[in-house]
Structure formats: structure tokens, C-alpha cells
Amino acid sequence: MRNQRSVKQEFLRKWITGLRRYSCDEKKNMSFLERKKAIKLSADIAMASTRDKTTRWSQALIANASSSGDTLTGSSKNNSSRSRKKMLMMRRRRPKVKSAKKEMSASCIAKRLAEKRTRKLKNLLPGGESIDEGCLVEETLDYIESLRAQIEVMRYLVTASQLIINPYP
Amino acid sequence: MLHCLNSNASGSEMTVLERQRATIKWQHNNNHHQGYSSSSSPSPSSSSSISLVQVQSSSPACLAAGAWPKLDNNFLMGFTSSPSSGFPLPPPPPPTTSAASFDLNSAISRTSSCPLPSLAEGKETTTPNNKRKTDKFHNTKVVASDNDNKDKRVKVAAPNDSATVGKKGTQDCGDNSNKDNSKVSEVQNQKPDYIHVRARRGQATDSHSLAERVRREKISERMKFLQDLVPGCNKITGKAGMLDEIINYVQSLQRQVEFLSMKLAAVNPRLDFNMDDLFTREVFPACAASFPAIEMSPNMANPASYLHFNSSQQIDAGINPQDISLRRTISAPVSAPETFLDSSCFTQTLPSSTWEGDFQNLYSVAFDQARAASFPSQLFTGS
């Protein structure tokens, strides 16, 4: 679909920039967990920004990150509040229709199963609670792709860092 | 009932609506009259047959055309006998035609591909089935013939006109805009009639159902993409199973991200990632080589060697990265100039100025490292 290599490059670049900014700000030594959190956060944000706010999950990710008081995402706070409002509005506009009858036919059971799972998927996806089913699948596709790219780049970074420490075991 | 035929109609120019109303009424009356010992009047109730024939002739695309053969002769004869302008009022229809009507109904039901309960049963029980069948039949004919607003009117008008016997199913589909109700009525419709075909005929002309079907097709198309993306989804058919797989996959990916970030945090005591060191270690097969591919093509010193370097890396990318690094040392002479070019390009593209101060130091350090790593000195003279 998209050019995977350019996506990875962009992600890596943004991630390293973000991490550098993070490390410059915090001069003291951070604990292990703090570091891990910083790494993950900057990676997520970098990944989201490669999508350039075209997808909903990326917007939601950035919004959540900025709402948690992170300094890395200063400018996107306005966008986050707007998107939050939009999400709330959408949620209100879609009331669940409760069917009065309880039908135990196979199709209804299957439908209920599928509904349960879509809800679970929506919870997994960042900002996915207020998406309709049509967009849900698209967003999942996009999200999976980005996650894959992110994991590959992170893995390379890990191995590279490990090799620096002990070059040729 | 058929009075209106005379009043409204101008000969054979009846509208489809009126024709169908007439046929429904005729059917209804027909069925009602079964209980009575109807006198067998020889007049073949040509008016009713005429209306049927007219319906038939009006819609050449009608599905039941093939099922009317045994009726055709009688009806056509009746048609030709009476003038088209006037429709004689029918007496209670004779049993022969009633039998024919039953055949008609059965024929209709055959074409709509659903077995009727045996006609030998009580007439009342057959009446709703017949009604439904004929209405469905009319619906199908309507759909087949013309797909404009008339269809909706006919569908809605038909149940209103006819008697209120067990109306369910396809008519409700037309009326209701609520998706749930249409699905429920579909189920109801299916149960007594053994139909496994989704009552598309009833749904086709409803704008809401159309939109819903389009939406469903879109979703299924995207699910196919997901099937390709998620490993192990090829064997699973069915929405719930696939969703399950997708959920598991997304969860595993997210967990991997967490784990890798933990590993990175453990490896680096401080959050400093020296890109230069990383590049010189040459563990970024695709990334490092691809940086120059896009950003530094004008600066390429020796594109031929770079291409060679690139291809060898891509082949090795799937293998253990440690092996890659070992192989790098062998091909290091080729790559050493490239890495320097890579890192310089990398810093050039970055807007942040904080890099450059650090970078200069790192550059020299890396240069020294490369020198110390037993590369033949000829390379540097060559580059």
C-alpha cells in the first residue's frame, strides 16, 4: 500500500528527534520504567505523526498523549480537544437500538458474537470507541501496518544498541 | 373489486397498479368463494383472466412466464372472445377456474422457489400462504419490470387493499426503515416457507436496505484485505472468527511494542541513541541503505557499489542480524564510505541544530572506530 521504507525512515527520524528532545529536557537519570515509558510514548507519537492526522487512531493517540501532560506534543492540544468533542458527539448520535424480542436463532447468536468482538476491537484501537463499522476495518488495517513498521524499526534499534555494547560475541 | 376495473380503466391501458390490485382482489374473492358451492358458470371469467393476461403481457420480463403454459390457452381464448373495452362482471368464479387459480398459485409459488403446504389442507391456512406468495410474486414482477417509485407504491398499496390475513414478511420490509425489523421479518418469513434465499426481492427496492447492502459489501471487501495482512486468517471464514484473529494479532503487536521498548530502556542506561554508532555497526539493513536512496542520490559517490550493497543487505535482512554484521565486516570496505555518507546526510536533513555539535564529535569517533577495525587503508585513499 504505502511505501514501507519511507514510512520507516520517517518514523525513525521522528522518534530519534523526540527521544533526543526528551533526554535533553530531563537531565537527571531516569528510572528504568520512566525510560521505557518515554521510549514507548515517543515511538507511538512518531508513528502516529507519520500518518499526518489522516487516520482517526493517530489523532486519538496524539490526543491521549497530550492530555496526559506530555511535553513533546505541545501544539497538538487544540486538535486533540476538537477531535475529542467530535468523538463525543458521534457517540451521542448513535444510540444502540435494543431489540425487544430475544431471538435465539443461529443468526442472532452469530450476530451477537460478532458485535462483542467488534466492541473488543474498538477498545483495542486508540480512539476506536466511536467509530462505525465501515471505518473500523480501514483503521485497523492502517493501525496494523504502522504497528508492524514500528516493531521492525524498534527491533533494529535494539540489536544495533546491543551490538554497540558487545560488538562481536 | 372488478367494478373498479371498468370504472378506472380505459380498455387495455390499465396501469400496473390497478391491474395488480384487481388480480389481488380477484384472488381474494376467488379463495373466499371456494367455501361456497359455486355454480359452475361456463363463462370462463374472462375478465379475471384478462386481467391476469394483461398483467402477464405487460411485463415481458416476468419470471413466471414459463409457468403459465397450461393456463395460457384458456385465458387467451377468453381474452379474444370478449372485447377489450368492456369487462363483463363476473359471477362467482367457477370451480374450474378456481382449480386453475390454485394451479396458478402453485405455479407462482413454484417460480418463487418455495414449496407451498399441500393445497388439500383447509383453505384458510392456504389463504395466507397464497396471499403472501402472490404478493411476493407481484413484488417480483414489479421489481423485474420497472424499478421506479411505482414499485414502492404498489408494494405498500397491495397489503392495504387486500384483506388483513397474516400479513408479514416482505411487505414489512418495504415499509419499515428500521434495519432490525426488516431482519426480524425476514426471519419470520423464512421459517414457515423454508426459504433460504434472503428475501432480496423485498429488499431490493428499499433505499435503506440497498445502502445497507452496499455498506456490508464494502466491509467484506476490507475484511479480505485484513485476511491477507493477518497471518493465519486464510482458513477462517466468518466474521466472528476473523475478528477474533485480528484482535489477537493486534494485541500481540501491541505487546511486542511494549516489550521492545522495555528492552531498549534496559540496553540504554541513558536515552542517548548515537545514530552514527548505530549506522557504523550496520545493523540497519533496510533503513540505513534506504536513507541515501531517497535523500542523497545527488551525493552518491559510487552508486554501483551502493546498489550492490543494497541488494546484498536485502537478501540478508531476513536472517539473524548478528550474521549480517559479521558479513558486513567482510564487505566492510565497500560499505565504510557509505556509512559516513549516510550519517552526514542524516544530519543534514534534520532541522534540529542540537545534533550538529554532538555530531562532529561522533563523526570523528566513528571515523577512528572504523579505522581501528582493521579495514584496509587503501579504501580511504580510494574514497
Image: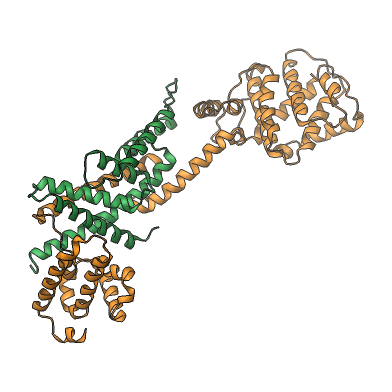
Chain colours: A green, B orange
The correct choice, above or below, for A110 with respect to A146 in the image is above
- Please name whichever residue, B231 or B76, is drawn nearer the observer in this view of the structure: B231
- Judge from the rendering whether residue A63 lies leftward or rightward of residue B114; answer left or right: left
Q: Quadrant of residue B34?
A: top right
The correct choice, above or below, for B188 with respect to A30 in the image is above
- Judge from the rendering whether residue B142 lies leftward or rightward of residue B290; answer left or right: right
Q: Quadrant of residue A118?
A: top left
Residue at the far top: name it.
B36
Q: Quick one: quadrant of the N terminus of chain B?
A: top right
- Judge from the rendering whether residue A52 lies leftward or rightward of residue B19; answer left or right: left
- Please name whichever residue, B272 or B24, is drawn nearer the observer in this view of the structure: B272
Q: Position of residue B353 (x, y in %)?
A: 22, 61
The correct choice, above or below, for B208 with respect to B243 in the image is above
At horizontal 42% and vertical 42% (from top left) the residue drawn is: A135
The correct choice, above or below, for B7 with respect to A26 in the image is above
Q: Position of residue B131 (x, y in %)?
A: 66, 23
Residue A44 visible, this angle: yes
At horizontal 52% and vertical 37% (from top left) the residue drawn is: B212
- Judge from the rendering whether residue A33 lies leftward or rightward of residue B128; answer left or right: left
At horizontal 31% and vertical 49% (from top left) the residue drawn is: A48
Q: Position of residue B314 (x, y in %)?
A: 28, 70
- Please name whichever residue, B375 or B96, is drawn nearer the observer in this view of the structure: B375
- Total labels: the figure holds 0
At horizontal 15% and vertical 50% (from top left) the residue drawn is: A25
Q: Quick one: quadrant of the C terminus of chain B?
A: bottom left
Residue B107 visible, this angle: no
